[in-house]
Image (cartoon, grey):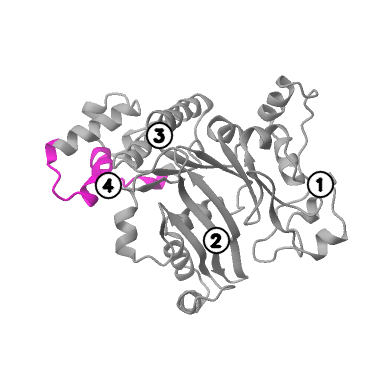
């Protein structure tokens, strides 16, 4: 199946991803639907702990492995068994993954692990969060960069592999790649490690790259360099991106469309310009008003002088979500309906979705 710019590449329908814990089921991703087209960048924006990384893991088929490990290493007797039984019985309200993920027309949820391994890295790849444990300290960066090719092409010649590794390390502007590719990850800075991870994600020629907090733990100068590399990936390689961040500035730099996530749900999804300059959901408004860079963007487009303010209250416990709309305890526009009834996630104008009872009134 060939894909052209604008074709539907990824489609996620009613996706749920729940962890098991001693306090109960953690609803990290709760009934989320979205799509990504070929050549497009979708930005996932939200506070830490809202479920963004869990969403990425669920999309590429790694969530259950991570959740099973978390249950097995907890100090709660029987938690691993409870998780396995829930997955086996496919309980809709139990730990595990529910819903559908379609990639290039093929359903990933329920796919055999061997088939998922053949797809991951080659057609869909991920730049993981956390530079300190993303690279194996026992192997050289050159070996790790070329590993996706070795996995998917066992007949590749060593000289060809080395040439391609050097090409891609040079592509992401890793200094002295020709001599340093034999060094271990501990010899590289955080910014250089991020470049290596980007090269690793690209080397097999994927259609979609998921970048999870690609600039976290990096200083401002290095952040700018990494954003430039990701923009090059999107524009020159025509690779689709799913960029995850709690930093609205990062999302504003790269995204064509933005999904704002809160308590495991998408509160609002729409074109980037709409979401940053004229959002409709109270949570999106509060979030955008918390970032100086976004406030300055609004002022430059003719808006009022920026007034920075945060969102009152704290994010909810994902094991004990509020009734009705999960944002209602922190919302200035809350009425009884918001407390009693869950909103409908609906398309209010072409390409613009919202999860709010009162969006039309405010």
Residue linked to disc 3: 238
Gap in angstroms between the C-alphas marked 4 and 3: 20 Å
Q: Work out whether mark 2 precedes mark 3 in sequence or the reverse, and give the earlier one.
A: 2
Asked whether disc 3 touches disc 1, contact meaning CB atoms under 8 Å apart, the reply is no
Q: Quadrant of residue 141?
A: top left
Q: Which residue is mark 1?
A: 360
N-terminal of the pair, mark 4 or mark 3, is 4
Residue 148 among those drawn in magenta: yes
Q: Earlier in the sequence, mark 2 or mark 1?
A: 2
Q: Are marks 2 and 3 in contact (CB under 8 Å)?
A: no
Name the quadrant containing residue 137.
top left
Among the 4 quarters of the image, the one containing residue 16: bottom right
Q: Earlier in the sequence, mark 4 or mark 1?
A: 4
Q: Is residue 60 magenta?
A: no
Q: Find disc 2 in the rendering and name its residue.
A: 15
Q: Is residue 328 above or below residue 90?
A: above
Q: Which residue is identified by label 4?
A: 148
Q: Nearer the viewer, mark 4 or mark 1?
A: 1
- Is residue 123 visible to the viewer in this orientation of the structure? yes
Q: Is residue 301 left or right of residue 55?
A: right
Magenta residues span 132-159
Lateral position of residue 328 relative to residue 185, left or right: right
Q: Residue at x 42, y 34 (%)?
A: 190
Marks 3/1: CA–CA distance = 37 Å
């Amino acid at each position: 199946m060939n894909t052209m710019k604008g074709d539907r590449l990824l489609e996620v329908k009613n996706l749920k991803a729940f962890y098991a814990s001693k306090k109960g089921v953690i609803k990290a991703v709760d009934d989320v639907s979205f799509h990504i087209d070929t050549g497009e960048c979708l930005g996932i924006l939200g506070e830490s702990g809202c479920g963004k990384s869990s969403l990425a893991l669920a999309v590429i088929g790694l969530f259950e492995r991570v959740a099973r490990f978390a249950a097995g290493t907890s100090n709660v007797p029987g938690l691993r068994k409870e998780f396995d039984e829930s997955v086996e019985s496919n309980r809709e309200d139990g730990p595990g993954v529910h819903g559908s993920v379609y990639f290039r027309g093929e359903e990933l949820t329920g796919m055999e692990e061997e088939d998922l391994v053949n797809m991951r890295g080659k057609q869909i790849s991920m730049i993981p969060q956390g530079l300190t444990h993303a690279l194996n300290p026992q192997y050289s960066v050159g070996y790790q960069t070329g590993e996706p090719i070795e996995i998917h092409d066992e007949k590749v010649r060593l000289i060809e592999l080395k040439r391609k590794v050097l090409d891609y390390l040079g592509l992401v502007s890793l200094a002295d790649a020709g001599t340093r590719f034999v060094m271990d990850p501990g010899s590289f800075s955080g910014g250089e490690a991020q470049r290596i991870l980007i090269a690793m994600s690209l080397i097999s020629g994927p259609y979609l790259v998921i970048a999870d907090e690609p600039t976290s733990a990096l200083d401002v100068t290095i952040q700018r360099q990494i954003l430039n590399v990701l923009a090059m990936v999107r524009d020159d390689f025509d690779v689709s991106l799913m960029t995850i961040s709690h930093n609205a500035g990062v999302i504003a730099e790269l995204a064509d469309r933005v999904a704002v996530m809160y308590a495991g749900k998408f509160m609002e999804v729409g074109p980037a310009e709409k979401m940053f300059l004229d959002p409709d959901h109270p949570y999106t408004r509060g979030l955008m008003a918390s970032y100086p860079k976004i406030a300055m963007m609004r002022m430059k487009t003719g808006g009022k002088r920026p007034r920075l303010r945060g969102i009152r209250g704290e994010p909810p416990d994902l094991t004990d979500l509020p009734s009705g709309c999960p944002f209602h305890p922190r919302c200035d526009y809350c009425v009884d309906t918001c407390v009693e009834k869950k909103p409908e996630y609906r398309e209010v104008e072409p390409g613009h979705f919202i999860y709010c009872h009162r969006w039309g009134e405010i």
